[in-house]
């Protein structure tokens, strides 16, 4: 199981996240591309830190929603979703190439990510964007009870997918995430580490109501703008590496 983090989410004079503190402990850095956060200088600097620690680089595209940090759904057409993704991925890809680096994957951000998981038409548009990109890149999806159908959809689209779980988020009984507005949605350190250990030991998580849910996981996410997750990143790394 790999460890990934959403990074590069500062913008101008607004500083968000702890990229330098997190980078030594992760395998994959999902870097904002300018539509929800991230500006050219932030992108360049985050790429340089990733290179220093030999961390795989991923694009973290979003709906065009800087004011809402990409956490508000937008009714974009199929073509708008495809071109928004191509635009953002290409921006980070070009910045990476200027440093002799290459992208490895794409992980949609915020509302786009959740809409992709919940709405077949949005997911199809994201898959089409990935399939029509000029080079193959893996796509990160949330691991859910529908993993087999999502894997089959990806196979038909001709794209590689990686399935992720979340170290610092609470799960609902349906295998989705408890909405951030709800109490208990963000886990404290104790519950976070317990969830990571449970995933590592038997590939399950325990939902908010106490139900045990099996998850197939390729990569585990810690949010870079979650102070509790950042403080716990070394301990999470140790659990991920444990036999």
Image: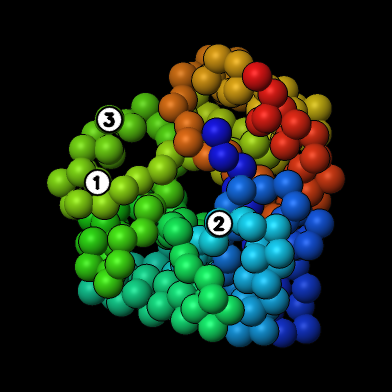
Among the two numbered marks 1 and 3 on one chain, the one whose residue lies closer to the N terminus = 3
Residue 9: image location, x then y, percent: 66, 69
Q: Residues within 10 Å of mark 3 (few under 14, many from 20)?
A: few
Q: Nearer the viewer, residue 228 or 185?
A: 228
Q: Nearer the viewer, residue 127 or 81?
A: 127
Residue 143, image quadrant:
top left
**Which of the numbered marks, if any, corresponds to residue 75?**
none
Quote the CA–CA distance across marks 1 and 3: 10 Å
Picture layout, residue 180 above or below residue 196: below
**Which residue is denoted by mark 1 in the rendering?**
154
Give the colour scheme shown.
Answer: rainbow
Secondary-structure class at tag 3: helix
How many marks the image carries: the answer is 3
Identify the residue shown where x is 43% and y is 49%: 140
Quadrant of the image containing the N terminus: top right
Secondary-structure class at tag 2: strand
Q: Nearer the viewer, mark 1 or mark 2?
A: 2
Q: Residues within 10 Å of mark 1 (few under 14, many from 20)?
A: many
Labels 1 and 3 touching (C-beta < 8 A): no
Secondary-structure class at tag 1: helix
Q: Nearer the viewer, residue 123 or 159?
A: 159
**Which residue is denoted by mark 2 in the rendering?**
56
Picture layout, residue 24 above or below residue 200: below
Picture layout, residue 199 above or below residue 98: above
Among the two numbered marks 2 and 3 on one chain, the one whose residue lies closer to the N terminus = 2
Quadrant of the image containing the C terminus: top right
Residue 16: image location, x then y, percent: 75, 67
**Which residue is denoted by mark 3 in the rendering?**
148
């Amino acid at each position: 199981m790999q460890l990934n983090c959403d990074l590069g989410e500062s913008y101008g004079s607004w500083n968000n996240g702890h990229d330098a503190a997190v980078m030594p402990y992760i395998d994959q850095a999902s870097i904002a591309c300018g539509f929800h956060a991230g500006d050219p200088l932030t992108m360049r600097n985050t790429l340089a830190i990733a290179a220093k620690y030999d961390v795989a680089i991923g694009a973290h595209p979003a709906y065009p929603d800087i004011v809402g940090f990409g956490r508000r759904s937008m009714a974009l057409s199929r073509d708008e979703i495809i071109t928004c993704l191509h635009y953002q991925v290409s921006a980070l890809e070009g910045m990476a190439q200027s440093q002799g680096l290459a992208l490895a994957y794409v992980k949609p951000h915020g509302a786009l990510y959740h809409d992709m998981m919940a709405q077949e038409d949005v997911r199809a548009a994201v898959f089409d964007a990935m399939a029509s990109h000029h080079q193959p890149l893996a796509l990160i999806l949330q691991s859910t009870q529908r993993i087999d159908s999502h894997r089959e959809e990806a196979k038909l689209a001709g794209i590689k997918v990686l399935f992720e779980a979340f170290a610092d988020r609470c799960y609902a009984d349906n295998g989705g995430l408890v909405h951030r507005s709800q109490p208990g949605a963000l886990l404290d350190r104790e519950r976070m580490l317990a969830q990571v250990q449970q995933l590592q030991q038997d590939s399950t998580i325990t939902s908010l109501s106490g139900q045990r849910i099996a998850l197939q996981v390729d990569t585990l996410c810690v949010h870079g703008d979650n102070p509790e997750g950042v403080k716990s990143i070394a301990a999470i790394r140790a659990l991920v590496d444990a036999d």
